[in-house]
Image (cartoon, rainbow, N blue to C red):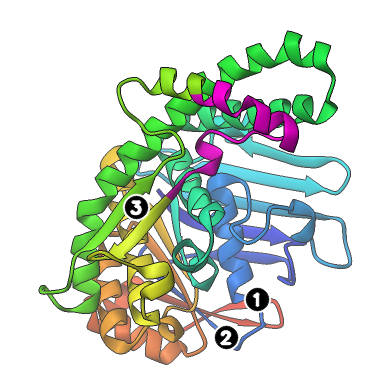
Amino acid sequence: MILENLRLDGFRNLQDVSLTFGRTANVIAGANGQGKSNLLEAIGFLSVFRSFRTAYDAEIARFDIDNFVIEGIFDSGSALNHEVHVRYKKGVGKKVIVDAEPVSRLSSVVGFFPTICLGIEQFPIITGGPRERRRFLDMALSQMSPLYLSALMRYKRAVHQRNSLLSSGDDSVLRSDLPSWDAILVESGVEVIAGRNRFLEQLQAPAQVVYQAITGNEDTVPLNIRYRPDIKPDKDIRETFVKRLERDRPKELLQRRSLAGPHRDDFLIQIGDRGLRKHGSQGEQKSALFALKMAEMQLLQDLKNFTPTVLIDDLFSMLDHTRVSGTLQAIREAAQVFITTTDGDSAVHQLRQAGFSPDAIARYNVHNGVVTRETV
């Protein structure tokens, strides 16, 4: 799926953008604070219909207005192009239209235009707390599997409803309503755990290969990814989950919140047996992040039978020359690449060194929210 055209109105500081993109590599250059990352954010929004930078759509609208519009035209390789329109207005909410048809359930179109986002704002996947790694799992799996997204939405609703009941302290309501939400929690939670377990097992091998390519050393100590579920995914997982809820019920009533399930999951990222979150160098941590994301790209490609688009924010300031070269080699398989940088000339040069044809590189400049195309 190739993003051919993008139109933006009211999106952060960007000024009424209307662009035609290159089909392979797109370099977005400009000084810091001009709007380069905002452009990537808008492109990523068309994939999962939410920002990879904030959970609140209202924060995206330009400061002087209360709405924004994103419109994308895509080439899927078939005879007809696809059009995706997103309109948001404060107090009204978000409306999505795909090929002239209003979308009633966003879950039905998440992953229509799959993207992989890479940048400093994803760094907490490695260095942050469990919430950041669960977010990575959910964003990746939601693009890959509508069934996973459906289970996740049911699970989150069950957690929310259980927490409301537990907070009420009403014994009669708890006795009458909690068992039904327990059943939904277990049923959907088992699906979420299974999806995460399978994804992380599949991620291990390609992540290790990419990690070695990025670091330029085949003798690199192995990159290991280890799932740490709150409920272990064994053959008796449903029974284990039910017993855990029964065991934790007194604590839940005391703390007034749900204490068991995949909303408490985590996974470890290690070099050998050394955890990268606390004991990795910045170079190792950054390489591991890029390896995870490139492995995610490969799994998406295998599942969807077409490669996702890769969005890389400020690659050349994040990695040293060796790691940049390895990363650019890895993303050559992407359907389309968008890279922001403060040095457009250097970015174009390094893309050419990595094997990108000069004719396949498009270049843009962002200044005070105005985006213009430049000659490469």
Residue 260 on the magenta segment: yes
What stretch of residues is rendered in magenta?
Answer: 244-266
Disc 1 residue type (three-letter): Gly
Residues tagged 2 and 1 counted as in contact (Cβ below 8 A): yes
Residue 368: image x %, image y %? 71, 82
Please give the name of the residue rendered at 18% of the width and 79% of the height, measured from the top-left corner: 216
**Marks 2/3: CA–CA distance:** 28 Å
Which residue is label 3 attached to?
296
Q: Which residue is pictured at 74% across the width and 67% down the height?
A: 12
Q: Which of the 4 quarters of the picture holds residue 162?
A: top right
For label 3, the crowd category at 10 Å Cα-Cα, with few meaning under 14, some 14 to 19 and many 20 or more, is many
Q: Nearer the viewer, residue 306 or 297?
A: 297
Q: Nearer the viewer, residue 349 or 114?
A: 114
Classify mark 2: helix, strand or loop: loop
Q: Position of residue 215 (x, y in %)?
A: 23, 77
Of the residues tagged 2 and 3, which is closer to the observer? 3
- Identify the mark at residue 35; answer none if there is no mark: 1
The relative height of residue 249 versus residue 121 in the rendered view (above or below) is above
> Up-down: is 186 above or below 194?
above
> What is the three-letter code of the residue carrying label 3?
Glu
Numbered disc in front, either 1 or 3: 3
In depth, the one of 302 and 5 nearer the eye is: 302
Please provide percent x and percent y for residue 224. 26, 58
In the rendered image, which residue does mark 2 sit on? 30
Label 2: few (<14), some (14–19) or many (≥20) C-alpha neighbours in 10 Å:
many
Report the amino acid beneath label 2: Gly
Pick the front one: 364 or 278: 278
Disc 1 and disc 3: Cα gap in Å? 27 Å
Residue 157 shows up from this direction: no
